[in-house]
Structures are given as structure tokens and as C-alpha cells.
Image (spheres, rainbow, N blue to C red):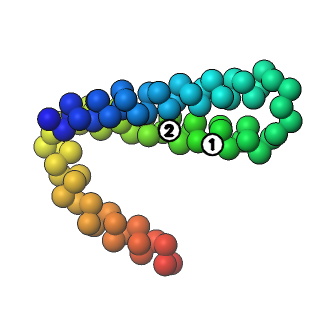
Amino acid sequence: MFRIILDQRKRREIDPTLEVLRLCIAETENGESKDEYTKARLKEIYEFFSEVEMLYNDIRQFPVSTIRGVVKTRGVVKKFLSMRKKG
């Protein structure tokens, strides 16, 4: 069930977002726009969503038992990341 939900969310949300960002980036590169800030931000956002897609592809390949184990350790990861922020 988790994989089905994950697949559908990616199909409905991530894939269209990546496509729109690709089109926007192409438009800023082909147009006469001198707005470098917008170009840079679009590329940053696109890179972030591309990384999310790569994470999705990685998670998609894990066995359910591994995903379950990762979910159970989220408190440890959260605590570790909180400690890194303070230090």
C-alpha cells in the first residue's frame, strides 16, 4: 500500500512539477530575460525536486522491511540532526 501511495503521489505531484520547471528554465534560457536571480532560483528548485526524485527511486527499491526499519529510526535521525544544528 505504501508503494502505491508513493507512486501515485510522485506521478501526480513530482513529475508535473519537474516538467513545469524544465519548461520554465528552457524559457528563461531561450528568451531575452536578463533576470539572473529567477533563472538561478528555478535551477535550484529543479535540482531539489530532482534530488527528491532520486530519493524516491532509492526508496522504491528497498524491501518493505528496510523501509519499516528506517521509519522506526526517524527519532534517532531527528535527534542527531538537531544536535548538529546546535554544534
Can see residue 28?
yes
Q: Residue at x 57, y 38 (%)?
A: 47
Residue 34, image x, y percentages: 86, 36
Mark 1, other Cα within 10 Å: few <14 / some 14–19 / many ≥20: few
Relative to 73, 78 lies left or right? right
Residue 28, image x, y percentages: 75, 29
Q: Identity of the amino acid at label 1? A: Glu
Q: Quadrant of residue 72?
A: bottom left
Q: Residue at x 53, y 42 (%)?
A: 48
Q: Is residue 37 above or below residue 82?
A: above
Q: Identity of the amino acid at label 2? A: Phe
- What number is the disc on residue 49? 2
Relative to 73, 20 lies left or right? right
Q: Name the residue beneath numbered marker 1.
A: 44
Q: Residue at x 68, y 29 (%)?
A: 25
Relative to 31, 86 lies left or right? left
Mark 2, other Cα within 10 Å: few <14 / some 14–19 / many ≥20: some
